[in-house]
Image (cartoon, helix red, strand yellow):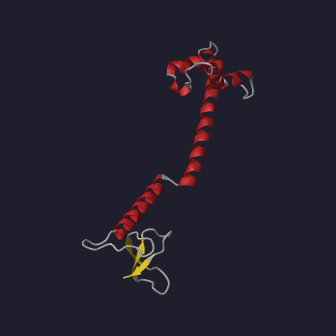
Amino acid sequence: MQWASSSAEASAVREVPQRFRRDRSDQSNQSDLTDLTDQERWALYAFWLEHESADVRANAIICLIHQANYLLDRQIAALEAAFVEEGGYSEQLAAARLAERERRRREISRQPEPGTVIPSCPQCGGPMVLRTARAGNNEGQQFRGCTGYPECRGVVKV
């Protein structure tokens, strides 16, 4: 006959990890169940898994299956939340690729042509780069802007 989930036997099987942690808490070795070998983990449940009654063995295994399902459900929920929050691998890879392209584009646009003298900013004296106006009366026209932008807004017409 299958144990009820609230039975003392089922509770005892479920409480093995907590008892293990309590027993280890006063020792210098702070390992958890994942640090144990298969034989050491088996020994924690041996009372039930090696019991002479097949009903006890079967019920203990059912309890362990329920624990595994519970932990897998929690892991899946955490992975779903991370996927919604951060996106999947392909999305993250695409975002990283686009960010790298943008970084390279900015780096190239800041480099002067060979043999060109880099003018200094009339306001702060820092180096200037060639830029293109994106809006306003000068949209599409090139100008030199301070590399200290937005703190410094020095510009020079080309």
Q: Nearer the viewer, residue 69 or 136?
A: 136
Q: Quadrant of the N terminus?
A: top right
Q: Residue at x 42, y 76 (%)?
A: 122
Q: Residue 57's image quarter?
A: top right
Where is residue 2 shown, x and y percent of the image?
Answer: 70, 25
Relative horizontal placement of residue 83, taking residue 105 as reference (left or right)? right
Where is residue 28 shown, x and y percent of the image?
Answer: 56, 20
Q: Nearer the viewer, residue 126 or 133?
A: 126
Q: Residue at x 50, y 53 (%)?
A: 88
Relative horizontal placement of residue 76, taking residue 132 as reference (left or right)? right
Q: Nearer the viewer, residue 130 or 30?
A: 130
Residue extending furthest bottom?
Answer: 137
Residue extending furthest left?
Answer: 115
Q: Is residue 154 above or below residue 94?
A: below
Q: Is residue 85 above or below residue 23?
A: below
**How many numbered dots are placed on residues in this image?**
0
Q: Quadrant of the C terminus?
A: bottom left
Q: Residue at x 57, y 54 (%)?
A: 85
Residue extending furthest top?
Answer: 52
